[in-house]
Amino acid sequence: MTDAYTLTPIARIRSPFAHKFGIPRQSGLVEEVRARIVFEPAFRNADALRGLEEYSHLWLIWQFSTVVAAGADGANWRPTVRPPRLGGNARMGVFATRSPYRPNALGLSCVRLVKADLHTPDGPVLTVAGADLLDGTPIYDIKPYLPHIDAHPDALAGFAGATAAHALGVADPDGLLDALDPETRAAVGGLLQNDPRPGYQRDPERVYGLRYAGYEVKFRVEGDEALVIALERETPMRR
C-alpha cells in the first residue's frame, strides 16, 4: 500500500507571461492581467462548469512547472528558503512562505472570474483576472472561492505583512507606453508598481526588462520610481 497519488492536469493557463521575471508574487495584485484557462481534452465537458458563473472568484491549484519538486522520496527537501521580499538573505521555514521551492511545488491562486465561454473551438474556456501564472502552467483543480468561509480580514500576515505596502511610482516621460492598448498599458503599469526586481537587487543604474504580452519594457528604478526607458516588440522564439 502506498500514499503516492498521481495528479493529472485538468487544464492549462494561457497568460501573457512567457517569462518568469515580472510575474506578480501573488495572485490578485494586478487585477488588469487577463488569462484564459483552457481545459485538457479529457475534461472539456461544459457540465463540469455548471453553476460556476454564480461565483465571482475561484481558487486555482497548480504546479510550479519550471521548478523540480522534492518528490515522494524527499531527495531535494530543504526546510528553509530565502523570501525575495526579505532581500534574499533571511531564511524562513518553507511552510511559512509561498516559495515555489517546496516538496510538491504546488501553487494556490485566487482569481476573479471574468467570463465562462462554454462553447469554443477549445471547449469550455474561463477568462480570469489577477492571475500570477506562467503561460502553459498546468492546473490540477479549480474550486469556488467562498467569502463567508475563505475570507478572514483579521488574520495575521506574518513577515509578509511588513512588505505588503511596498509599491513603486511609474514614470514614462517619453510616453512610450502609449503605444500599448489600454488594457495592456494598465497591466504593465500595475506590474511595475509591484516592483518585479529580486529583493537583493537595488542598483539604480541597472536596466531591467519586463516581458509581457509580446513586448519588452525596459526600465530602471530610481528611488521609489520605476522609470520606463524603452519599449520593444519581442522577437518570436523559434520552435
Image (cartoon, grey):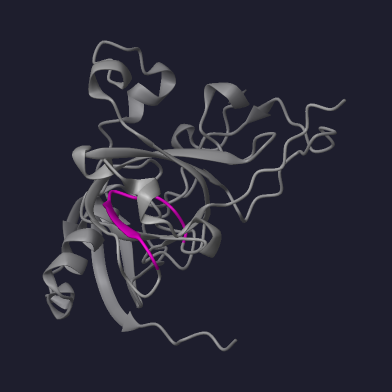
Q: Position of residue 70 (x, y in %)?
A: 76, 38
Q: Is residue 54 left or right of residue 125?
A: left
Residue 224 shows in this picture:
no
The residue at 64%/39% (across/down) is 101
Residue visible at 36% across and 75% down?
121
Determine if the magenta segment contains residue 124.
yes
Image: 33 above or below 237: above
Q: Is residue 53 above or below residue 215?
A: above
Assign the C terminus to one quadrant of the image: bottom right
Instruction: Out of 142 and 156, give the one closest to the viewer.
Output: 142
Question: Where 106 sits versus 9, above or below?
Answer: above
Indicate the quadrant containing the N terminus: top left, top right, bottom left or bottom right: top right
In the image, is 27 to the left or to the right of 18? left
Give x and y (percent) for residue 66: 62, 56
Residue 212 point in image, percent of width and height: 35, 68
Name the one closer to the observer, 177 or 42: 42
Magenta segment range? Answer: 123-134
* Residue at 58 percent of width and 39 percent of height: 106
Q: Report x, y in % for residue 53.
A: 22, 45
Q: Nearer the viewer, residue 217 or 50?
A: 50
Q: Nearer the viewer, residue 119 or 235?
A: 119
Q: 159 above or below 19?
A: above
Q: Which quarter of the figure has residue 233?
A: bottom left
The residue shown at (55%, 36%) is: 99
User: Can I make out residue 159 in this image?
Assistant: yes
